[in-house]
Image (cartoon, helix red, strand yellow):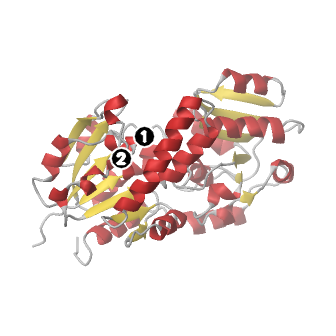
């Protein structure tokens, strides 16, 4: 008789509700693993979110820990995102058994530096390459204080990621991120696609009547992208353009107000956002960094029609065949003008199925994960 398989998962935040891109992978792997009979012991750091009883439906146990914030989490050696998630209570609970440990993000890897756990089976989920991500935050922040913090954090993260590269197995969401970690010394790097909702490709055929950019507009990079599209792509073409997302700034609204063909939809409900994605004729997704994978890209490919992106949006994802690649304002504008008159065809739909159906199958990816954690052991 096979013994039950138990797994500790350390989560950088409470993975419910699933209301922003960063928690999709954190949450949706829980039901997929439970379905395979894995006994999950979930450990969550509390960070602006309440405890969630629904997590008990998927886990044998759920534990919550306060995240240390402010000056107490500053260090000359460890990145803030790591130091702020050091917990003696967590370490004591992990030490009570020898179950393998899955750490959600470099954020949750402080135990790799604890000599009590030498020889333990550790796995780190890479949601992106953090030192690159923080360098992009540095580039796009308008606040001098934030720029200094992001630059210092990027420096610490680059050194820290090298330090832990040989202490765990790593699970990346793109092939490109896997290559980055291999290059800095990680010997065991596995590509494992993102866990998603039970999306089925339901792209509407035919033609929509507007273009859409969506995202959390309180994030500096997303606001920059929206402003760039408004002032450089949709500045002189009479095609309806909608910008939708969380907490748009007054400056963004002011720019939009200067163009009769554009509008801002602030803080749409999830159902409204999905409706916009489905009904748009073109989803436009420029990006300023290529680390990780953009959930807005996957959402648009599963649920929307045409997608126009730049190379950074699709780098390392294998999804470029399903998108139209633009490089600058002129090529984005030309792509919009060209695609706005083209229906989304059955051939387009077939290609989506070929690229997405198998790659983002939660059950298959949960099986891949268990094979990595317990190689050669049947479920």
Mark closer to the chain start, 1 or 2:
1
Q: Indicate the quadrant containing the N terminus: top left, top right, bottom left or bottom right.
A: bottom left
Q: CA distance from mark 1 to mark 2?
A: 29 Å
- In the rendered image, residue 259, in percent from the top left (x then y), is placed at 84, 28
Give the residue displayed 78% in from the left and 35% down from the top: 230
Q: Secondary structure at mark 1?
A: loop
- Residue 148, position in %: x, y? 53, 36
Dividing the image into 4 quarters, which one contains the C terminus? bottom left
Judge whether 303 appears above or below 216 on screen: below
Characterize the local packing of mark 1: few (<14), some (14-19) or many (20 or more) Cα atoms within 10 angstroms: some
* Residue furthest to the front: 76
Disc 1 to disc 2: CB gap under 8 Å: no
Mark sitting on residue 78: 2
Task: Give left or right: position of 46 versus 285.
Answer: left
Q: Quadrant of residue 144?
A: top right
Q: Secondary structure at mark 2?
A: loop
From the viewer's side, name the closer residue of 61 and 326.
Answer: 326
Residue at 83% across, 24% down:
258
Query: Which residue is pictured at 21% across the width and 61% down the height?
Result: 100
Give the image location of residue 254, x and y in percent: 75, 22
Q: Name the image quarter holding residue 325.
A: bottom right
Residue 196 visible in the displayed image: no
- View extreme (bottom): residue: 376
Classify residue 63 as left or right of residue 198: left
Residue at screen point 55% across, 55% down: 291
Q: Residue 18 bears which disc, if any?
A: 1
**Residue 239 position within the rendered picture, expressed as x and y whole percent measured from the top left:** 84, 39
């Amino acid at each position: 008789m096979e013994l039950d398989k138990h797994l500790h998962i350390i989560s950088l935040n409470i993975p419910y509700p699933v209301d922003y891109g960063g928690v999709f992978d954190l949450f949706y792997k829980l039901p997929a693993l439970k379905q395979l009979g894995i006994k999950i012991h979930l450990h969550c750091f509390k960070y602006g979110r309440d405890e969630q009883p629904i997590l008990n439906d998927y886990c044998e146990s759920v534990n919550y820990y306060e995240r240390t914030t402010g000056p107490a989490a500053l260090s000359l050696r460890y990145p803030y995102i790591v130091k702020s998630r050091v917990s003696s209570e967590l370490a004591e609970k992990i030490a009570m058994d020898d179950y393998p440990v899955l750490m959600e993000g470099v954020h949750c890897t402080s135990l790799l530096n604890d000599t009590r756990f030498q020889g333990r089976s550790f796995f780190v989920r890479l949601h992106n390459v953090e030192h690159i991500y923080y360098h992009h935050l540095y580039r796009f922040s308008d606040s001098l204080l934030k720029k200094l913090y992001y630059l210092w954090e990027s420096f610490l993260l680059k050194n820290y990621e090298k330090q832990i590269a040989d202490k765990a197995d790593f699970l990346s969401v793109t092939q490109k991120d896997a290559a980055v970690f291999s290059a800095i010394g990680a010997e065991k790097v596995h590509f494992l696609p993102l866990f998603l909702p039970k999306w089925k490709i339901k792209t509407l055929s035919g033609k929509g009547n507007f273009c859409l950019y969506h995202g959390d507009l309180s994030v500096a990079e997303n606001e920059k992208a929206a402003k760039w599209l408004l002032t450089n792509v949709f500045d002189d073409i009479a095609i309806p353009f909608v910008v939708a997302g969380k907490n748009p700034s007054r400056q963004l609204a002011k720019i939009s107000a200067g163009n009769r063909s554009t509008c801002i939809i602030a803080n749409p409900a999830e159902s409204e956002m999905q409706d916009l994605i489905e009904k748009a004729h073109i989803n436009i997704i420029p990006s300023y960094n290529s680390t990780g994978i953009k959930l807005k890209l996957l959402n648009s490919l599963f649920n929307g029609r045409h997608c126009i992106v730049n190379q950074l949006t699709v780098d390392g994802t294998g999804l470029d065949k399903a998108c139209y690649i633009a490089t600058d304002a002129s090529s984005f504008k030309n792509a919009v003008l060209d695609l706005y008159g083209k229906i989304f065809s059955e051939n387009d739909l077939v290609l989506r199925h070929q690229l997405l159906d198998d790659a983002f199958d939660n059950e298959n990816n949960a099986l891949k994960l268990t094979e990595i954690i317990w190689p050669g052991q049947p479920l």
